[in-house]
Amino acid sequence: MHNAGTKAYVMYHTSLRNNRSAGAPRGRYSSAYVQLSGPGDARPTAMQLLEDEGKSEEWKERVILITGCAAASGIGLETAKTFYRAGAHVYVTSRTEEKAREVVETIQRGEGDGKVTPFTMELDSLSSVRQCANDFLKQEKQLHVLILNAGVMATPKGTTRDGFETQIGTNHVGHHLLFRLLTEALLSASTPSFLSRVVCVASTGHRLSPASPSDLEWTLSDPYHSWLSYGKSKTANIYLATEIHRRHHDRLLAVAIHPGLITTPLSRHLDEEASKGFPLSDFLNTQQGAAMSFWAGYSKEVEKMGGKYLEEFEESELLPEGSSLPVYKKGRAAWAYDEKAAKDLWEATERAIENVAR
């Protein structure tokens, strides 16, 4: 990892540890966040949320699509398991057919009477994203919940197959295209009693950097900082949610979420110095890490939170003016709700995708 990127990363995660003394969260499960003791502590799991919310027959008629599901671990799998248990028809994407089959087998071994259907999709290839969307639309005309969960973190310097920096291309551009291709299915499923939902899995890592159209023009000859690039891609995830809300708020509910600190294969590119920044007590297991994604897609509580960035079951608070890394209070960066930046990035992403298609 580049030295500057490593320092930014360590400062960022040190701030997460220090945030705990800045005040308890205000959300529904706030008492579970007062004293943290690591994976499996009192913080809720996705399955617990389903029990608390209660199952509803209407979910048997609803269709969910979740990107980035792997059988070995990860919050995508746990989110899919919970929607399956709720009775929904869950479509899951994995990078290979073998992994997709393993995900289906894992989900079907659990409790529930839903349905599960696998697709293969590689977000670093726009042609693969298009193929996945086409495959979905051959089977379904409506989509009730789209969870943009897949992603990479702190990858080595490189590009996607279409020439974008790996993290912005995978985490943002691929998901932007997928949403655009499935927009009509989402709008078709939306009703006044349940607006179709788009859940963008972001991160407190967005504090590392804002995002701009120039990030789509990065080349291998440009300087590269893995954690700053990750931060840009996570800000882009928030921008996608806020811009979807701005454009479709009367018919779609779009939110961005931070799932928490979770031990998953996503962290496979961390080096020893960066790993020291993680306070063990803050970690969640994958069942707990899936809680935010499931809540955002399922709970009635979220109905009035469209266009917001959510963490710990509430809207994230704005950091004090002038705050910079390291931060000492949990919350969102000042640029997270920058409407112009979100609009500019949307339009630039549309142009970039169009250029690839030519």
Image: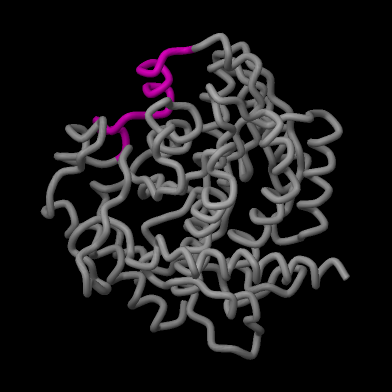
- Between residues 331 and 104, which one lies in front from this camera angle? 331
Up-down: is 326 above or below 64? below
Up-down: is 297 above or below 127? above
Q: Position of residue 63 (x, y in %)?
A: 66, 26
Which of the 4 image quarters holds residue 273? bottom left
Which residue occupies 36% across, 70% down? Answer: 9
Q: Which residues are magenta?
A: 39-55
Which residue occupies 15% across, 39% down? Answer: 34
Up-down: is 256 above or below 235? above
Which residue occupies 66% across, 16% down? Answer: 61
Image quadrant in which the C terminus is located: bottom right
Which of the 4 image quarters holds residue 26? top left
Q: Position of residue 290 (x, y in %)?
A: 45, 36
- Between residues 201 and 285, which one lies in front from this camera angle? 201
275 lies left or right of 108: left
- Between residues 242 and 236, which one lies in front from this camera angle? 242
Q: Is residue 165 visible?
A: yes
179 lies left or right of 234: right
Q: Position of residue 75 (x, y in %)?
A: 50, 39
